[in-house]
Amino acid sequence: MDELKTTRLREFMRGAATELPMMLGVVPFGLIFGVAVNAAMMPAIPAQATSSIIFAGASQMIFARLFGEGAPLFTIVLTAAIINLRHVLYSASIAPFLKPFSRKWKFLLAYLLTDEAYAIAISHMETLPPNAPLLRWHKQWYVFGAGFTLWLGWQISTAVGIFIGGQIPPSWSLDFSLPLTFIAIVVPALRDRAGIAAAAAAGICAVAAAAMPLKLGLVTATLLGIAIGMLVEARFGAVKMEKAS
């Protein structure tokens, strides 16, 4: 039993340690959310509750801005849902690895699924041998460690931003930390032609379609990136860059 607990703790700590560098971008973004909440004159307690209920930085940011503009509740909810459509893709990608785990674990890990946690989890799972005994290796604890670390950091950083956000000078330009975080997530994962083509197509489309209402440009860019990636993979196969060189 002691060995079992040690294995679980080790996997949890490994996931947490791998996630920690991502906090360099997450914490400033949490502070930015706090600033947006203050600008929107949103009550502090409900604003902080969104970090636990919605738990999605981009959606929370839009939630705060639309709230400040007096948008109807339906519009706010619909916009947040559209922005979070990417999580459906994350779920479909990581679902085969979570299949051996119990329903309770799946619910918990689904709640903790974010961009950063997904990137850490899927990168780790893909390095494991085929048919690896994930349940016996307690890999759910690795994913839990990564997800919980980000969850805790997000709760703290948004709370700090909400309660002292008005004292953060605009000259800090904290919003620049968010794209840096996603660059750090995406670039290491680009290991074949299909991935590079998908990322390039999605990036170009996201910039070109940035003016679309309800952030539909992000959804359009995502779907286009998937389509381009699938076409390139069907045409050339998943040729690894290291092999091609």
Image: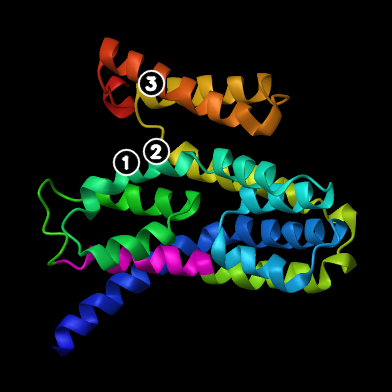
The residue nearer to you, when weighing 82 against 21, is 82
Q: Is residue 120 above or below residue 108?
A: above
Which residue is under mark 3? 229
Q: Which residue type carries mark 2?
A: Leu
Q: Quadrant of the N terminus?
A: bottom left
Q: Position of residue 45 (x, y in %)?
A: 72, 73
Q: Quadrant of the C terminus?
A: top left
Please tell me in which quadrant of the rendered image residue 81 appears.
Answer: top right
Helix, strand or loop status at disc 1: helix
Rate crowding at label 1 as few (under 14), some (14 to 19) or many (20 or more) other CA atoms within 10 Å.
Answer: few
Q: Main secondary structure of the magenta part?
A: helix
Residue type pointed to by label 1: Ala
- On the question of residue 127 being in view, the answer is no
Residue at (83, 52) in percent of width and height: 68
The x and y percentages for residue 154 are: 59, 65
Q: Amino acid at mark 3?
A: Gly
User: Horizontal placement of 55 versus 19: left or right?
Assistant: right
Magenta part of the chain = 137-151
Q: What element does badge 3 sit on?
A: helix
Q: Which residue is mark 2?
A: 89
Asked if the residues shown at circle 2 and circle 1 are in contact, with their CB atoms under 8 angstroms apart, the answer is yes
Taking the spot 35% from the left edge, 54% from the top edge, the residue there is 121
Mark sitting earlier along the chain (3/2): 2
Residue 47 on the magenta segment:
no
| Residue where numbered disc 1 is placed | 92
Query: Is label 1 or label 3 in front?
Result: 1
- In the picture provided, is 147 more to the left or to the right than 210? left
